[in-house]
C-alpha cells in the first residue's frame, strides 16, 4: 500500500512516530499522480503538482512547526481557487493562467499553523461555476469510480484526487454544493461549514454571500480534523463569525441517541433517482437504529431555491469577475489602442462559456429596470428560505436529504443543457442560501456501482451534530 | 420671458484619515507611484475589504456638522464600471442606505439674507486610482493606485441653489465646515475637494424642473461659478431661440471658459448598484451617534454670530476671522482678557495676514503666538510705544520670535513720554523751521502736520504723538 492511500489520521500518526516524513508521502503522491497522468483516461485532478513548490512548503513547515500540531505535516491538496503564496492560482481559467498569488488565504495561514502542508493545486470548474468539472480550461476531470463519468463540481478535482488516492485530503469551496456534490459523486466525505465559520479572505470570490471553504476527505474523522485546522475568526473578513472553534474530532463517534432528525418531504419528490432514494433511506434507517428520532418535516420554499440562487449568485459573480479585464488582472490577449476593445476582446477570449453565461445573467438581473423584479425579489425569497429552515430547526437537530437527485452522469451528457445541470443542484443550493453547515457522507452505491451521498444539515454553527451523525452513517454502511 | 437656474452640487471631500477606507495602507499624498498598496486596495483576487473605523467616524462627524440625520443602519454598495484606475471594476460606495441624509447648510443669498441649502445625503465611499498619460498621445498610460481606496465623503445637495454666486457661497460654506470639524483640508489642488454640478433653467414661476445638465471638470470654486454662469446663459439662449435642450453631461473647458458636450443620457452608465456582500451593514446605536456629536466644535456660522456679539466685530471682520478655525482660534486666544478685541481683529486681518500669506505659513506654526500679539497691544495701550513703532516691533517679532517687551527694551524703542524731553525737541524743530511757523501764523494749517512729522523724525518715532501734539499746540498757539 502506497502512503498516498492513507487518511489524515493515519498519516499524522506515522509522522508523529517518525515512521515517515511529509516528503515520503508527497513522493508517493507524485508517483501515483504520474502513473495516473500516463493513462489515456487520466483523472486530471491537478492543475499543478510542482515538487519544487511542495519542497519549499515542507521546508517552511519544518522551520515553524512542531509535530504535535493538529495535522503534524500532512500534505493537503488545495482547490485552485484558494490563494497559496508563491503558487499559481488559476481558478481553472485561461484569464488567470499566469496569475501567481502574492499572499496566503487565511484558511491556508491557519492550515499551516496547524501543521498542514499545502501540496498541489486542484482542478475545478472555471471560477467554481459548474456542477461537472467540465468548464475547466485545464480539461475535464474524471470520476475514479468510473472514468466515463463526471466527478461532480465544482470541486471535482478535489473529490476525484481524494477518492482516487492522489491526495490525502483536500480543501475545496462550496457556493451552491461544490463540495458536497462532487464528494457524493466520488464517494468521499465533504463538508461545507456554516457561512462565516471559515474565513473567505484569499478565496477568489465567485458569489461572496454563499462561498465557503471546506474539507474533502476520505473519512469523517479526517473531515473533522481538517475543518478544525482551518476554522476560526478572521479580522480580514467581516463576514467571518467571531464564534469559538470547536474540537470537531471529539464528536466523531459520539452517540446520536435522542437526536431529532428531520426528513423534508420536498427533497424526496419527482426527479429523485430510485437507486439514490434507496441508499438514502437505508442510511436513515441506520440513524434510526442508532437512537435518533425520525420526523417528517416540510421546507415549503425549496422549489424557489434554484431560481433564487442563480439570480443572486450570478449577480455577485458579474461584479466579482469584472476585475479580470486584462488591465490589472488577467492575461492580456490582445494589443489595441481602444480601451473598450481591450476589455471586450480580453474577456471574450479569457472566459469560458459557462462563466460568460453567468456574468451575462448577473449583469442583466442587476440592470436598472430589472433589479427590483429579479435581484431584490430573490433577496426576499432568500429571507423566506432562511426562515423556513429556522422554523424547521425549532423541531429537529439535524435534517438529512439526498445530496443530488442522480449519481454521476456521463461526461458530456449535460454540456448543452445548462438548465438541467442547474436543476441538479436542487438539494444543495438551499443550504447555501440559508448559510447552514452541511456535509455529504457516502451512504451506498447505485446498481451501476456509483457512489451515493447522504446530505446532513445542521443549524448555524452546529457542525458537531453533523460529525456525530456522519460517523454513524459511515460506520453503518 | 425671464429664466432662473436650478442648481445642485455633488461634492467629493477626501477625508484625512491616516489609512485607506478598507485596508491599512497609508493615504499620504505625493509618494512614489504604487508604493502604498496591498492586496485589498489593489483588488487582488480573493482579498476582502474591512471598514476603517476612523473613516466612518469622520464621515459621521461631517454628517452631523451638515445637520444630517446619521443612519443607525447603513450599507455599502458596489458601483460597477470599467476603468483602468479602478482595479476591482467596482467602487465601494453607498447607495440605498447612506450613512448621512437630510441635512442643510446655511448660506447668504444675493440680498445678504440667510438661506438654507438642503443636503440630500453625504455618503462614504472609496476613491479610485490616478491615470498618468504620456505626453505623446500615442504613448502609454500609467496607473498609480496610491490614491485608490482613500476615503471620500460624497455630499449631494438638494437643487436649492438659484445662482452661480449661491453655488460659490455654498461651496465655501462646505469647505469651511469640513475644515472646522477637522475631517479634510479641502485643498482642491491636492484633489481633496472635487465638484460636479447639475444645472437646469426654467421660466420664473414655473414649478417643474427644466432639463438637467451635469458639468464636470472644474478645478476651482471660481471655475464652478464661471461654468455655471456660462451654462446658464447657454441654456437660456437655446430656449429663447426656440431650441430644445437634452439631458447631457458637459465638461468645463478652462481655456475657452465654456462648457463642451461630453456624453448624452443614452450614453450614461448603468452602474448596477447592489449591496456589497463582502461588508456587513453598519449598525450604530443612538448613543454612539450622540457620543460623536459631542466632538463637534462650534461651527463657522455660530462662531461668526458669537464673535459679532461677544467681541463686537463687524460682520466683515467676523467672516474673515472665522474663515478658518485656526485663525478664529488664534484670534480668540489673542483677545483673551483683552478689552478691545476689535483692534486685534484689525491687526490680524491686515498685518498678520500679510505675513501669513507672504510666507505661506500655517497659523499653528506661526512664530508669533496669540499671547505675544496680545502683549504687543498691551504695551501699545500703556503708551509705551506708538502704533508706528508697534509695526516695527511686530516685524521683529515675526523675524526672531522674541516677545514685544524684549524687543522694545533691546532696541530702546520705548516711547518718550517725558514732557521736558519732548519740549526740547519741539524747541529745536521750531527753531529749524521758522518758515513753517510763519505759515501757521498766516493760517496754513497743514504746516502743523509738517512740524509734527519733524518732531517724530527727530525722535525716531518714539515721541508720544499725543503728548507731542499737545506741546506743539501749546507752544504755537498759547504762548502768544
Image (cartoon, coloured by chain):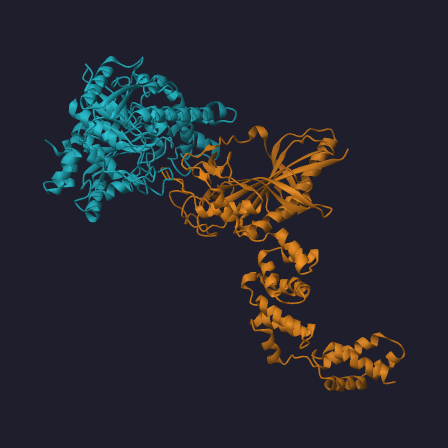
Chain colours: A cyan, B orange
Q: Is residue B133 left or right of residue A94?
A: right
Q: Quadrant of residue A195?
A: top left
Image quarter of the C terminus of chain A: top left
Comparing A92 with A374, the one in front is: A374
Q: Residue furthest right?
A: B442
Comparing A161 with A434, the one in front is: A434
Comparing B192 with B480, the one in front is: B480
Residue B475 image position (x, y, % from top left) = 82, 83
Residue B315 image position (x, y, % from top left) = 70, 55
Image height check: is B27 above or below B79? below
Residue B316 image position (x, y, % from top left) = 69, 56
Residue B81 seen in render: no
Q: Is residue B116 left or right of residue A425?
A: right
Q: Quadrant of residue B4?
A: top right
Image height check: is B428 above or below A181? below
Image height check: is A152 above or below B386? above
Residue A361 seen in render: yes
Q: Is residue B402 left or right of residue A336?
A: right
- At 62% from the left and 67% from the top, the residue drawn is B337
Amino acid at each position: 500500500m502506497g502512503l498516498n492511500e492513507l487518511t489524515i489520521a493515519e498519516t499524522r500518526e506515522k509522522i508523529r512516530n517518525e515512521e515517515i516524513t511529509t516528503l515520503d508521502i508527497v513522493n508517493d503522491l507524485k508517483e501515483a499522480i504520474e502513473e495516473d497522468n500516463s493513462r489515456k483516461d487520466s483523472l486530471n485532478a491537478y492543475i499543478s503538482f510542482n515538487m519544487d513548490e511542495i519542497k519549499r512548503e515542507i521546508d517552511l513547515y519544518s522551520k515553524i512547526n512542531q509535530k504535535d500540531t493538529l495535522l503534524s505535516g500532512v500534505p493537503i491538496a488545495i482547490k485552485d481557487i484558494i490563494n497559496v503564496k508563491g503558487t499559481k492560482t488559476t481558478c481553472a481559467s485561461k484569464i488567470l493562467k499566469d496569475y501567481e498569488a502574492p499572499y496566503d488565504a487565511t484558511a491556508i495561514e491557519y492550515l499551516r499553523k496547524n501543521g498542514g502542508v499545502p501540496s498541489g493545486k486542484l482542478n475545478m470548474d472555471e471560477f467554481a461555476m459548474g456542477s461537472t468539472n467540465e468548464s475547466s480550461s485545464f480539461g475535464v476531470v474524471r470520476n475514479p469510480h468510473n472514468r466515463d463519468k463526471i466527478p461532480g463540481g465544482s470541486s471535482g478535482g478535489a473529490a476525484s484526487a481524494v477518492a482516487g488516492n492522489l491526495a490525502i485530503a483536500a480543501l475545496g469551496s462550496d457556493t451552491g454544493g461544490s463540495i458536497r456534490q462532487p464528494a457524493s459523486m466520488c464517494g468521499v466525505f465533504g463538508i461545507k461549514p456554516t457561512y462565516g465559520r471559515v474565513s473567505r479572505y484569499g478565496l477568489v470570490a465567485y458569489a461572496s454571500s454563499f462561498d465557503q471553504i471546506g474539507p474533502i476527505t476520505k473519512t469523517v474523522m479526517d473531515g473533522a480534523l481538517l475543518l478544525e485546522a482551518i476554522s476560526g475568526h478572521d479580522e480580514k473578513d467581516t463576514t467571518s463569525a467571531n464564534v469559538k472553534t470547536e474540537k470537531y474530532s471529539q464528536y466523531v463517534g459520539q452517540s446520536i441517541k435522542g437526536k431529532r432528525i428531520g426528513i423534508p418531504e420536498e427533497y424526496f419528490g419527482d426527479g429523485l433517482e430510485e437507486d439514490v432514494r434507496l441508499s438514502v433511506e437505508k442510511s436513515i434507517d441506520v440513524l434510526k437504529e442508532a437512537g435518533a428520532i425520525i420526523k417528517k418535516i416540510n421546507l415549503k420554499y425549496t422549489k424557489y431555491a434554484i431560481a433564487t440562487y442563480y439570480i443572486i449568485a450570478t449577480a455577485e459573480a458579474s461584479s466579482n469577475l469584472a476585475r479580470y479585464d486584462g488591465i490589472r488582472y488577467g492575461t492580456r490577449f490582445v494589443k489595441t489602442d481602444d480601451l473598450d476593445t481591450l476589455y471586450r476582446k480580453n474577456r471574450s477570449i479569457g472566459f469560458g462559456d459557462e462563466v460568460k453565461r453567468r456574468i451575462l445573467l448577473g449583469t442583466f438581473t442587476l440592470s436598472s429596470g430589472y433589479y427590483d423584479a429579479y435581484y431584490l425579489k430573490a433577496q426576499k425569497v432568500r429571507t423566506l428560505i432562511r426562515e423556513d429552515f429556522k422554523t424547521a430547526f425549532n423541531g429537529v437537530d439535524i435534517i438529512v436529504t439526498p445530496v443530488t437527485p442522480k449519481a454521476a452522469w456521463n461526461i458530456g451528457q449535460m454540456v448543452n443543457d445548462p438548465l438541467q445541470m442547474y436543476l441538479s443542484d436542487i438539494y444543495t443550493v438551499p443550504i447555501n442560501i440559508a448559510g447552514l453547515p452541511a456535509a455529504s457522507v457516502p451512504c451506498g452505491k447505485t446498481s451501476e456501482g456509483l457512489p451515493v451521498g447522504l446530505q446532513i444539515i445542521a443549524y448555524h454553527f452546529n457542525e458537531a451534530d453533523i460529525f456525530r451523525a456522519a460517523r454513524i452513517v459511515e460506520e453503518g454502511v | 420671458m425671464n429664466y432662473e437656474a436650478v442648481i445642485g452640487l455633488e461634492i467629493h471631500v477626501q477625508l484625512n484619515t491616516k489609512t485607506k477606507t478598507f485596508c491599512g495602507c497609508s493615504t499620504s499624498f505625493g509618494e512614489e507611484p504604487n508604493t502604498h498598496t496591498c492586496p485589498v486596495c489593489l483588488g487582488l483576487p480573493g482579498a476582502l475589504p474591512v471598514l476603517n473605523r476612523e473613516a466612518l467616524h469622520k464621515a459621521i462627524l461631517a454628517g452631523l456638522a451638515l445637520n444630517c440625520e446619521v443612519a443607525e443602519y447603513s450599507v455599502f454598495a458596489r458601483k460597477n464600471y470599467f476603468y483602468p484606475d479602478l482595479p476591482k471594476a467596482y467602487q465601494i460606495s453607498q447607495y440605498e442606505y447612506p450613512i448621512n441624509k437630510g441635512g442643510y447648510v446655511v448660506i447668504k443669498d444675493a440680498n445678504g439674507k440667510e438661506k438654507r441649502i438642503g443636503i440630500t445625503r453625504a455618503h462614504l465611499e472609496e476613491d479610485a486610482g490616478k491615470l498618468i498619460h504620456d505626453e505623446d498621445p500615442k504613448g502609454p498610460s500609467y496607473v498609480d493606485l496610491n490614491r485608490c481606496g482613500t476615503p471620500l465623503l460624497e455630499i449631494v445637495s438638494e437643487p436649492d441653489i438659484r445662482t452661480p454666486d449661491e453655488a460659490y457661497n455654498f461651496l465655501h460654506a462646505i469647505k469651511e465646515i469640513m475644515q472646522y470639524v477637522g475631517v479634510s483640508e479641502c485643498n482642491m489642488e491636492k484633489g481633496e475637494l472635487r465638484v460636479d454640478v447639475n444645472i437646469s433653467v426654467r421660466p420664473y414661476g414655473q414649478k417643474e424642473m427644466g432639463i438637467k445638465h451635469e458639468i464636470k471638470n472644474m478645478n476651482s470654486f471660481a471655475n464652478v461659478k464661471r461654468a455655471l454662469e456660462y451654462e446658464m446663459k447657454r441654456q437660456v439662449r437655446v430656449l429663447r431661440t426656440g431650441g430644445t435642450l437634452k439631458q447631457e453631461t458637459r465638461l468645463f473647458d478652462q481655456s475657452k471658459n465654456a462648457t463642451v458636450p461630453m456624453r448624452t443620457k443614452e450614453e450614461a452608465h448603468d452602474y448596477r448598484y447592489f449591496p456589497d456582500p463582502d461588508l456587513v451593514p453598519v449598525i450604530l446605536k443612538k448613543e454612539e451617534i450622540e457620543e460623536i456629536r459631542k466632538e463637534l466644535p462650534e461651527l463657522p456660522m455660530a462662531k461668526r454670530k458669537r464673535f459679532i456679539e461677544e467681541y463686537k466685530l463687524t460682520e466683515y471682520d467676523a467672516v474673515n476671522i472665522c474663515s478658518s478655525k485656526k485663525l478664529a482660534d488664534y484670534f480668540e486666544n489673542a483677545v483673551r482678557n483683552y478689552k478691545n478685541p476689535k483692534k486685534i481683529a484689525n491687526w490680524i486681518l491686515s498685518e498678520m495676514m500679510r505675513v501669513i500669506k507672504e510666507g505661506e505659513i500655517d497659523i499653528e506654526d506661526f512664530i508669533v503666538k496669540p499671547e505675544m500679539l496680545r502683549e504687543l497691544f498691551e504695551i501699545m495701550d500703556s503708551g509705551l510705544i506708538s502704533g508706528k513703532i508697534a509695526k516695527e516691533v511686530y516685524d521683529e517679532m515675526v523675524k526672531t520670535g522674541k516677545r514685544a517687551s524684549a524687543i522694545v527694551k533691546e532696541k530702546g524703542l520705548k516711547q518718550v513720554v517725558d514732557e521736558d524731553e519732548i519740549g526740547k525737541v519741539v524747541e529745536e524743530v521750531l527753531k529749524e523751521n521758522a518758515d513753517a511757523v510763519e505759515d501757521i501764523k498766516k493760517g496754513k494749517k497743514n504746516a502743523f502736520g509738517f512740524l509734527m512729522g519733524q518732531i517724530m523724525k527727530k525722535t525716531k518715532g518714539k515721541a508720544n504723538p499725543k503728548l507731542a501734539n499737545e506741546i506743539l499746540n501749546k507752544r504755537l498757539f498759547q504762548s502768544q
